[in-house]
Image: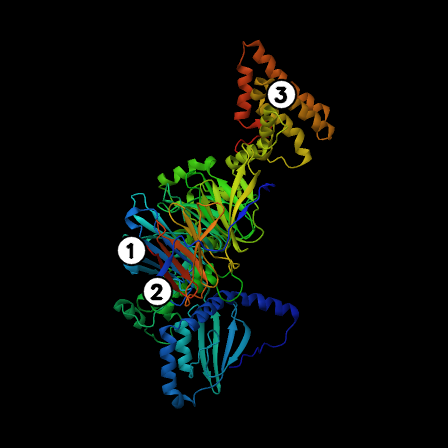
Amino acid sequence: MSKIALGNESLVGSLTPSNKKSYKVTNRIQEGKKPLYALVFNFLDARFFTVFVTAGGNRITLYNCLEDGAISALQSYSDEDNLESFYTVSWACGVNGKPFVAAGGVKGIIRVIDVDNEMIHKSLVGHGDSVNEIRTQPLKPQLVITASKDESVRLWNIETGICILIFAGAGGHRYEVLSVDFHPSDIYRFASCGMDTTIKIWSMKEFWTYVEKSFTWTDDPSKFPTKFVQFPVFTASVHTNYVDCNRWFGDFILSKSVDNEILLWEPQLKENSPGEGTSDVLQKYPIPMCDIWFIKFSCDLHFNAVAIGNQEGKIYVWDLKSCPPVLITKLSHTQSKSVIRQTAMSVDGSTILACCEDGTIWRWDVITK
Amino acid sequence: MCRQNCRAKSSPEEVVSADQNLLVYSKPVRLYNVLHLRSRTNPSFLPRTLSYAIRANGKRKSRNTGMVVFNYKDCNDTIQKTEVTENCSCPFCFMRCDSFKGLQLHLSSTHDLFEFEFTLSGEYQTVNVSVKLDAFRFEEEENKFEPFSFCSKPRKRRQRCGRRKARRLNVRFLPLDSPDLANHTENGTTLLNNGYRGLGYPEATFGMPGNTPPAIARSSLDSDAKAVLPTEAVVPATKTRKLSAERSEARSHLLLQKRQFYHSHKVQPMTLEQVMSDRDSEDEVDDDVADFEDRQMLDDFVDVSVDEKRFMHLWNSFVRKQKILADGHVPWACEAFSKFHKQELLGCKPLSWCWRMFLIKLWNHGLVDATTINNCNLILEKCDNNSDSNNNNSSVNDHQDDINNNKVDGMDVDKDGK
């Protein structure tokens, strides 16, 4: 367990907006009555930067963000199981670069949809409980990682449908895993966090041969020698409550707990002694009215800003390039009262989308002066 | 409906022997129970039509309706049990036949594993029942066990398939006085003949507790079930006892095929081939990962030299792979370790010192005695001398062969850790 370095005062941001940028509502869609838990822009393929996907109930819907605030629906899928409730969705790619969408939820089955052919490419089974988050390795977008209520994290090859590695066991999470994220440049590394209040950094370096093997595997996927990774390289306890979202910010980590704040902190791993190290909390971004779990934040492609909704329908946009933290703006609308489960910032941050508990999608566009 | 046991009072011995004689009924009766239970959820053509006819003719026949006495006979043709039913009902499937003639038709066509003798004397309508012993034997000898495809398939109420429809309607009744008329039913394709010919299947489920055989129940409900029965599941055997063992194997084989199984740890769906193989690799320790974790754990030690770590790793892996669990295993483990790792120990002085120190620690704890330590040293010295003399490697090779043959002092050394 890592220690928190003493003597380093972390900087807390002020809730007074700088209003360096302002946004206005340009569209609102009522997708259905069921809560929407996830929406995400496609950052993997420059041809589809304006396309986003939502997940909620047993539905997955693809939209295109057009100019002047317009949104067009592209495709919609509904799971044959009416009791499915999708919690998370992620873009991915086949080996030939075809866009895929991977979604998971209460049933624990990951549906991989081949968007070009409008059909299911693979259904990945293995998780023993709900899937809380799916993330794609941007450097190898056939690899996705899933966080589950079954206290495990799994690495999959969606092209071949193989479960490559399972991260669980003696050093693993002790409660639901709520969020996972790949390191942006170190392909072997990812972080996971959950209800056990910890954030764990895992390395796949020693197991990379299996990852490579998964691409050439032609036998039955269930015969693949799936390996268990029991020990993370680092465990941080920077939060004292459920941690429901974490994202790498370079070698730093942005993580959000239900304590009404996002932390920016640096994991300081000790060379040659995995498991030990310290975490240095650098900055704190307060988010009022954000103390229920399963509220996730999002950043633009270049990590200039982070946007997060709260339980009364407001969105906070923080500047990530300033120290101490600066609140760029607070977005609120009289009709936006429902819990915002997730936001999605477009590649350049000019559009912010929010999906809500009441089944609505809100579109905010930056006001150009 | 009333069912009375009218057996006269008799001595306990007689009761026992009578019960034993009645055992011969159990097999056919259970078969009919199975079919009857099925027919409740999955009504077949026959009873529905009959009940329709019965309702239409109900009043007219009411005069003839009455009590029927059933006498169950054993193989010596003595009456062992008597039963009375009302409304000319069938004692096996409780079907109301309403007339004695209807009952005759019903029994002869539906319960053809029994022989029936119908007598009508004055007020009494009597049926003498005996078991057709050769019915079973005949089927077994004739190798007529076929997949129980008929019962496995869900019966649809509306059948579009003309051929099947024809088969269903092809129920013909032959003159009543022929006791085994069902055997001569045209084509042998009436409903129950089908069930009868497929006896292999329901019999395979007889061992199940309770009245509802799960295999049948499931297959009849599961529309995906294609009633695939591998040939070995229904191979007839000549001896009944041997048969039941094989049947139970066939039954579990069948159940294994019908369900989707998952690996215990990965929770990946298993292929049939994996289900049928007798090894479950997921219960085994993954040695690659365990070795990696062990090295990682040792790397954490800051006050331990590289050679010490290397020795610890060798020992830990050895102990894990050989499953050294109890104190009593330790002397054997030490000697086996000396042989197995002698090349490493001899090739690296600091490593062999680690080993000696470790032996002393074990001796301190009372886990090994002086003899064991001596044996271990002799193993290494012998090897050492041989390699020093440098003119005869065969001895070294002999030792190597010992290990390769997985034999150390007559005990198995399993290199795979199995």
Label drawn at residue B352: 3
Above or below for A248 versus A66: above
Q: Looking at the image, which is closer to me, B145 or B280?
A: B280
Q: CA distance from mark 3 to mark 1?
A: 65 Å
Q: Looking at the image, which is closer to me, B241 or B12?
A: B241
Q: Quadrant of residue B88?
A: bottom left
Do we see residue B184 in this rendering?
A: yes
Above or below for B153 versus B357: below
- Give coordinates of residue A117: x percent, y percent: 27, 53
- Give coordinates of residue A35: x percent, y percent: 42, 64
- Read off the chain for label 3: B
Crowding around mark 2 (Cα neighbors within 10 Å: few <14, some 14 to 19, many 20+) is: few
Residue contact at pointers 3 and 1, CB within 8 angstroms: no
A278 displayed left or right of B376: left
The residue pinned by badge 2 equals A29
Q: Are marks 3 and 2 on the same chain?
A: no
> Which amino acid lies under the numbered mark 2 shown in the image of this protein?
Ile
B399 displayed left or right of A303: right
> Which amino acid lies under the numbered mark 1 shown in the image of this protein?
Glu
Q: Are marks 3 and 1 on the same chain?
A: no
Label drawn at residue A118: 1
Crowding around mark 3 (Cα neighbors within 10 Å: few <14, some 14 to 19, many 20+) is: many
- Read off the chain for label 1: A
Q: Looking at the image, which is closer to me, B56 or B418?
A: B418
Indicate which label's residue lies in the foreground, 3 or 2: 2
Q: CA distance from mark 1 to mark 2?
A: 23 Å
Q: CA distance from mark 3 to mark 2?
A: 75 Å
Q: Are marks 1 and 2 on the same chain?
A: yes
Identify the element where label 2 is drawn.
Answer: strand
